[in-house]
Image: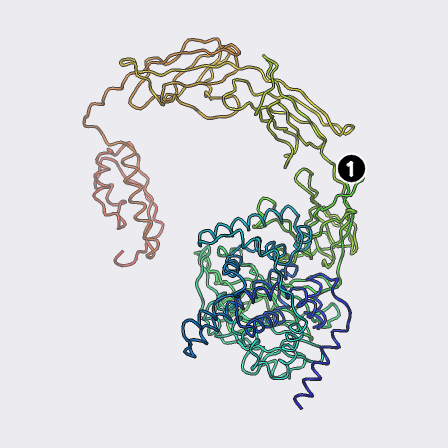
Amino acid sequence: MANSRDDKLLGQIERLFDRGAVASLSDEQILERFAIHHDGAAFRALVARHGSTVLAVCRRFLRDPNDVEDAFQATFVILVRKAGGLRDREALGPWLYGVAYRVASRARADAVRRRRRESVDEEAIALVSAPDPGLPELRWLLDEEIARLPHKLRLPVVLCLMEGQTYDEAANQLRWTSSMVRGRLAEARSRLRERLIRRGEAPFAVLAWIEFEPSPVAPGLIDAALSVVAHAGSGKAATSSAVALANRTMRSWIMSRIGTAALVMVGAGVALGVGAMGLRLVAQDREKPMIVLAQADRPAQEREKADAPPVPVVAPKRVGGAMGSEIHPVTIEGRALDQDGRPVAGASIMVTNANRSRPGGSDKVLGRCVSGLDGRFVLRDLPLPVLQPDPSPIPKPAEGRFEVAGWAPGLAFAWHKIQSYRPSPRPADFKETEPGLVIYTGEPIHADLVLGPPARIHGRIIDDQGLPVVGAKVQVGYIDDPRRPDGSGMWNCRLADPAGGDVPREFTGIDSLPESRRSAQTDADGRYVIDGLPREAQLLSLIDQDLTLEPHSPTIATSTTKLEGVRSLGYDGELNHEFIRPRTVRVRVTLADSGQPAPKVTVLAQGAKMQRAGAIGTTDAEGRMTLALPLGSYTLRLEPPFGLSYLLSEQSFEVKGDARESSVDISLDPAAVVVLKAVDADSGEVLAGAGFEFVTDTSADRKALHSQTVFVDHPTTDQAGNLRAVMVPGRRQFLVSQVPEGYEPLTKASPMLILKPSETATTRFEFKKRPEPVAKDQEPEQDQVGQRLRTIWQAQSQLIQRGRMRARRIYQSGDSIPLDRLQQLLESLDPDKVPPLLELIPKTFPEAGPSHGLTLNSSLPKGK
């Protein structure tokens, strides 16, 4: 009977293999086909495509061929379980490499422990834990270092060095540019080289090996992996060493992410099964999986029991935050439906943190899953941060906000209104404006999603010569900030109101959607398409190509109704754009007095709009440089380098549309140089730290002196007692503005000097030492009294944290109380107690007359 059932299951899988060729599809398309339709042919294609990389990792870590085969099969068992929730599906190869590394590491550790339990000698243990003898030890050390690389550096290493892709192929798969792939691969090589050198290894041989030694996968090994998946449904999963290894690896993986305590609520023995619809995940009786993919064939009572909110046995975990926060495990369930109320199977579901602040380093996405055949989804024990409220006269509850969103092929992405979880019993007098948005302890969390028909935008991007712009990026809803590649950008995605307003249904988690759902790049003909957008939505958009072109950022709406200030495109709209290519402006800078070229001069074009690139540069040895400027009027600002005694120069310039290139010659006028000397009048020693100002023969306004006409630096005399300044020629008088410490000026102003171009003028300032002050009894300074008042105020302000206090404000004429006696009174008071100043001042200073006070709060706790 068992053999008959096995043959039937294998036959079902073999029939799935005959559905059609999938070799021409991308990883993302194949994985989506497998996750939604449970297509066995898609699974075989994934094993065949990435099996070589996985097998190579397993062989580098393990000696026993049986262990190698188990690790290979366990890697793809984990792929089956995780297929519906992968985030970066276009980077499947690097993800599988990371899984294979974890599985092989776990298998090697298990083998060592197994040999030790069997009392095998140390030599045998070393043989088990050693890598393949045909490969140097450096190879699995390299795997350890590759696994430690940042995600963005590990991707090109796996794709280019392990899978043998070209730079262009890897760039196309990752949606990067070829230069990004080259640069990050070079950075990864550099880091690996440094780390291996620190470990005492020679990195160059290892880096050469990884490009030239693939591990071809025999067809029998692929069939064995498929057999493990198929036989899991017949009850043999528990005895399969590959499935057991996958279970152990996933348990340690989860533990490393959410901690040992959180595993109380998570089962560890998820089994693989084959049903009438193909491969899917099912739950064994003794546990509940974190992600439920299909529940339609389970009894209703069992589903209701399994999906009930679990008892929160996991204690909240405190984490950092604005006012502090705690992590609370929450379970969210719901259904993905289309606009007619029919279930949507295979919809990708995502839950994001919608709190106004997040602890540093925390992930915005709390969890992902895929809806089952009946559209149902359940996400268990999501780590939701619950923020503590700020201190306020009006008490506010602690709560954690989250947002549920989903998308599916052929449908628009959708999101639920933001919901709040409050870890406390529901108050009896709480009035809810809309049911299901505020959830208290013990209440189920439910969020249904309606995935409606999609809207689409498409278009063509060209330049002003009619040529297609290749590689232009079109984004909607969320716009990346090129200045912060790993940070946040700008976003605007909300439901549009046909009446011209907007419904308060903003989608705050749009930045966590897959990029393919909200952006596209133009092809060789300049065309692009973005599909799967929600209808009747208002979205921020951006069309950009590189920093030399001016970006286009209209607000659009996928609506057939015209909205004020918004470009309505309808449900299948066309959004085209024509970039105006910048014109080439060739600049030549010379010295006016000699006609020689001026090197290292900074040329800046200042126009009505700030340019992102192409508007600034530095002249070469021949005084030449090139700008790239859009059409318009500019002021060319020429800034000579420090040490070159020439003046800042400006010249107007216009870029016209009738010429692709233009040129301009500009000369720098020579400046006058003045040297101011500071000396001790008695000893003749030079003095540092003297500063100066100047006036002109036409204005008595004192102006700050600077070293150069280009910048502001407020210089002072150096250790040689000199201050050199480059100035506009003319008549100038210099005055002392800053005196060296311990001195006073004898010469406070210079005579009126005539500064001439290309000439240096010198003037001398003499200083004498300031006499020591004579000590005498004097009345306390005002700032001493103020300091004592501040000390008392700071001490009293701490009483706010202890309880209610009495605070009084006293109005008294300041000149009627001697400062020395007021200081004595203040010093006699205990700063840790509230002094009765309203009573003390009239008693201490009866001659001052009555004072006037205002009591703010007359209640004070005992003992305070």
- Quadrant of residue 448 within the rendered picture: bottom right
Residue 661 located left or right of residue 592: right
Q: How is the image coloured?
A: rainbow
In the rendered view, would you say 645 is above or below 287? above
Q: Is residue 303 visible?
A: yes
Q: Is residue 458 above or below residue 769?
A: below
**Residue farthest front in this picture:** 134
- Closer to the camera, 484 or 499? 484
| Residue at numbered disc 1 | 464
Q: Amino acid at mark 1?
A: Asp
Taking the image as drawn, is residue 427 in sight? no
Q: Position of residue 427 (x, y in %)?
A: 50, 70
Query: In this figure, what is the number of numbered marks?
Result: 1
What residue sits 43% from the left and 56% below the top? Answer: 391
Residue 520: x and y in percent read 71, 52
Q: Quadrant of the N terminus?
A: bottom right
- The residue lying at 22 percent from left, 23 percent from top is 773
Front in this rendered view, residue 165 or 304: 165
